[in-house]
Amino acid sequence: MLGRLYPQFSSLLVLLLLGSAVAACYAQAPASPDVSLRETRQIAAGFTSERLQVWQKRLNLTDWNISVVMERAANLKPKTLGNIHWDLDRKTAIIRVLDPADYKMQTKEMLQDMEFTIVHELIHLNFAPVVSEFQRSEANRREEEHAVNHMADALLKLDCDKDR
């Protein structure tokens, strides 16, 4: 997926991507000591923007104005890697994904995780009109999270299989 050339990537990013086309489904190479946090954030921002567009279209959310922002772990709920806040009336949403500075993994895995977070949050958004009518409890939130995780995982596996 990432091995494809996208016009919005800078020439530096294109060189990084071309030099790292190895993984089965994601072609981004692991972070090297000479790749700065700033460059990693730029790679992540381009990647998340592109994947948001893809998944927004696939999940039929093109009439929504959705953005992705990087958020430090201290600003997210404990044990979470992201969240989404939406306005149903205005059809706007902001997806927050964990900032690259807080990941303790290689770039390829970090990007996979960010894409999972985007898909996961977009599935929540698809359910928003329905679940907003229900009485919310900790138990049904756990059930929803469990179901959304399985759906996101299944969609990403299908997407990965399609690209092989």
Image (tube, helix red, strand yellow):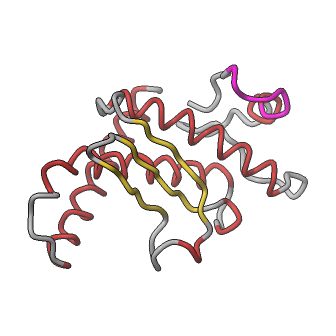
Question: Horizontal and vertical percent for residue 51?
Answer: 51, 36
Question: Horizontal and vertical percent for residue 39?
Answer: 81, 48
Q: Which residue ends up furthest to the front in the rendered image?
A: 89
Q: Residue at x 63, y 61 (%)?
A: 99
Would you place residue 113 above or below residue 29 in this image?
below
Question: Horizontal and vertical percent for residue 21?
Answer: 69, 32
Q: In this view, does 22 lie to the left or right of 58?
A: right
Q: Is residue 25 left or right of residue 16?
A: left
Q: Which residue is drawn at 47% across and 31% down?
A: 53
| The N terminus sits in image quarter | top right
From which residue to which does the magenta span run? 7-13
Observer-nearest residue: 51 or 89? 89
Observer-nearest residue: 76 or 163? 76
Q: Which residue ends up furthest to the left in the rendered image?
A: 134
Would you place residue 9 above or below residue 136 in this image?
above
Q: Is residue 36 magenta?
A: no
Would you place residue 113 above or below residue 10 in this image?
below
Q: Residue at x 46, y 50 (%)?
A: 94
Q: Which residue is drawn at 59% across and 77% down?
A: 74
* Residue 105 position by quadrant: bottom right
Q: Does the magenta stretch include residue 10?
A: yes
Q: Which residue ends up furthest to the right in the rendered image?
A: 34
